[in-house]
């Protein structure tokens, strides 16, 4: 993959002290923008991507040649209307789409970082991205928006930079990763590290890829993004290009074939070590803990307007966990709206064509922009 | 009912924080926002109506007043408004107590089941009254705890809250309710509007 020519990067010279204690500087942050920044620079929206997303929010992703991950929500006349708003999205640090990550070369050893890369957190991710505001000369963002891990970054951002944003939209997320969330992430990490090709993270020097392990990690995670009902309706017990069971371990069922496909396409676009690092960052996320157990204190300094959105069939970040954010905000009289969207598409609902969600997002943004 | 909204608006002081419980499609919130300098938000159980509120630029929480008022600390709001929905709750007593915990004051409006047309309807037809303000049949009505103006006044004594101001809406006329005209208002008012305190 020749990434360079398609990827815009901001070189961050300023030292960034990471939660793990290490300090990094002169590191690249890859980003993409959509729409135009207006003269008063008050129409900027910072979108945060989820675990396996990247900066290519909408349109064709120039690297994968597929549609951007949030094409349903972002674009001209869409919910996040790029005719109106200037949308910025950065690849998180630890990622593998151009931002500083474990697949970068360590100048000290002249080898790929691998597991020598520092463990990063959601806090580190947003502290890296705040530099984009200075880069574009933006004093205050109109909005920060993100789903899943993107939502965690939204919460951390407004907590770290309470005056830097007018509206805040965490979607299908949590303020603290649950035991179940950590368990699923650990399953994925174990699948990767159990792959012989992983070679303690040094696979790039051996010219191999732990593709089997990464594919299994993706398959397991993918199940958590869907709902039981959604799976049942789409696949049921339908067989894959055969009339009857074959009494073997090939993909007899369509769901097996589907998962295998999801796993195989994923390994082409994602780095196994990045998967380890980013899932770790999610597991370490506990915003309440950063404020001595009181989540409300994370938001006490901001006057931003919040809009929290959850989905009925999301069992990975269920409504109650989203509501806990709402409760923490109401406890301090913050300006917060909340809606649970009816959908049987599971956690993935926020990425898909769910009209009630897309309308709510659009209406909230457009109405708030008028204020 | 625009007049009801106007009466509610007149009861509210400026620069106050208000919660509209069961805000429906946000019509009252919109009206109050336009006519008063206030900070208002709503709570509504219907997803569809929450969507309408969002499209109007109103701050609304999807939720059930019977359970979700718990999240607000004491005296979070200067006023809590409950417009014609008290009768729809499973436990009106808990709701009133919650309103007065969350709000310093509450404004409660109730469709008066003691109105003469309702009484006459039941007397002559012998079936549960169906009127303009109560358009449902007994089996599909959301109004499971209908009460009269007199009932509400009695209720204030039973569960111990103060009625600070009580108004009757009769044929587009607003009048005060007091102890000497209570029975009359209970017969002729379509709507009772109460400003209450702990």
Image (cartoon, coloured by chain):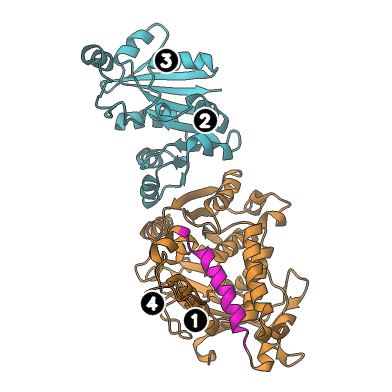
Chain colours: A orange, B cyan
Give how far across and how far down residue B190 sits, in percent. 30, 21
On screen, residue B8 versus residue A164, left or right, reads left
Quarter of the image where the C terminus of chain A is located: bottom left
Q: Which residue, as the protein is rendered here, is positioned at the far front?
A: A247
Q: Closer to the observer: label 3 or label 4? A: 4
Q: Are marks 2 and 4 in contact (CB under 8 Å)?
A: no
Which of A345 and A284 lies nearest the eye of the viewer?
A345
Q: Earlier in the sequence, mark 3 or mark 2?
A: 2
Visible residue check, residue A277: no
Q: Secondary structure at mark 3?
A: helix
Distance of mark 4 from mark 1, alpha carbons? Answer: 23 Å
Q: Closer to the observer: label 1 or label 3? A: 1
Badge 3 sits on which subunit?
Answer: B
Residue B151 tag number: 3
Asked which quadrant contains residue B166, the reply is top left
Asked which quadrant contains residue A13, the reply is bottom right
Distance of mark 3 from mark 2, alpha carbons? Answer: 18 Å
Residue A242 tag number: 4
Relative to A153, residue B40 above or below: above
- Residue under label 2: B99
Q: Earlier in the sequence, mark 4 or mark 1?
A: 4
On screen, residue B92 versus residue B143, left or right, reads right
Badge 2 sits on which subunit?
Answer: B
- Residue under label 1: A265
Give how far across and how far down residue A170 sits, in percent. 53, 59
Which of A337 and B123 lies nearest the eye of the viewer?
B123
Relative to A72, residue A106 above or below: below
The question of residue A225 being in magenta is answered with yes
Visible residue check, residue B44: yes
């Amino acid at each position: 993959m020749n990434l360079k020519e398609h990827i815009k990067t901001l070189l961050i010279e300023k030292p960034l002290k990471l939660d793990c204690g290490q300090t990094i500087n002169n590191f690249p942050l890859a980003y993409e923008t959509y729409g135009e920044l207006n003269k008063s620079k008050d129409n900027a929206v910072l979108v945060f991507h989820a675990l396996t997303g990247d900066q290519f929010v909408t349109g064709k992703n120039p690297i994968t040649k597929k549609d951007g991950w949030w094409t349903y929500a972002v674009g001209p006349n869409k919910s996040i209307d790029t005719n109106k708003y200037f949308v910025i999205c950065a690849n998180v640090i630890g990622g593998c789409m151009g931002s500083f990550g474990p697949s970068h070369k360590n100048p000290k050893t002249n080898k790929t970082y691998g597991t020598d890369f520092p463990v990063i957190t959601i806090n580190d991710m947003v502290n890296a991205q705040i530099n984009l505001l200075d880069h574009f000369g933006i004093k205050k963002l109109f909005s920060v928006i993100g789903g899943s891990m993107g939502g965690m970054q939204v919460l951390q951002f407004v907590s770290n930079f309470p005056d830097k944003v007018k509206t805040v939209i965490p979607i299908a997320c949590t303020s603290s990763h649950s035991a179940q969330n950590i368990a699923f992430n650990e399953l994925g990490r174990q699948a990767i590290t159990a792959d012989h090709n992983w070679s303690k993270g040094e696979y790039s020097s051996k010219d191999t890829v732990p593709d089997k392990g990464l594919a299994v990690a993706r398959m397991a995670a993918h199940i958590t993004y869907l709902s039981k009902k959604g799976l049942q309706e789409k696949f049921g017990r339908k067989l894959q290009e055969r009339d009857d069971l074959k009494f073997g371990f090939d993909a007899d069922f369509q769901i097996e074939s589907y998962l295998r496909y999801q796993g195989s396409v994923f390994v082409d676009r994602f780095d196994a070590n990045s998967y380890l690092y980013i899932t770790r960052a999610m597991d370490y996320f506990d915003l309440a803990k950063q404020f001595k157990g009181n989540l409300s204190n994370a938001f006490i300094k901001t006057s931003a307007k919040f809009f929290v959105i959850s989905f009925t069939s999301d069992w990975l970040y269920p409504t109650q966990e989203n509501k806990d954010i709402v409760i923490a905000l109401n406890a301090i009289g913050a300006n917060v709206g909340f809606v649970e969207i009816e959908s049987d598409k599971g956690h993935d609902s926020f990425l898909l064509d769910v009209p009630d969600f897309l309308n709510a997002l659009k209406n909230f943004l457009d109405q708030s922009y008028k204020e | 009912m625009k007049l009801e909204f106007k009466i509610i608006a007149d009861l509210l002081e400026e620069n106050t924080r208000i919660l509209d419980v069961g805000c429906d499609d946000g019509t009252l919130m919109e009206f109050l926002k336009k006519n008063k300098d206030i900070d208002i938000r709503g709570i509504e159980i219907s997803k569809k109506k929450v969507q309408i509120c969002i499209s109007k630029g109103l701050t609304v929480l999807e939720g059930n007043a019977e359970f979700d008022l718990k999240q607000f600390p004491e005296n979070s709001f200067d006023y809590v408004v409950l417009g014609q929905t008290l009768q729809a709750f499973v436990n009106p007593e808990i709701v009133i107590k919650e309103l007065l915990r969350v709000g310093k004051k509450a404004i409660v409006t109730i469709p008066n089941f003691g109105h003469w047309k309702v009484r006459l309807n039941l007397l002559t037809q012998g079936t549960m009254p169906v009127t303009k303000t109560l358009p449902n049949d007994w089996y599909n009505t959301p109004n499971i705890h209908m009460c009269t103006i007199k009932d509400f006044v009695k209720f204030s004594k039973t569960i111990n809250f103060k009625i600070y101001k009580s108004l009757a809406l009769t044929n587009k006329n607003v009048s005060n309710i007091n102890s000497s005209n209570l029975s009359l208002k209970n017969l002729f008012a379509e709507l009772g509007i109460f400003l209450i305190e702990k």
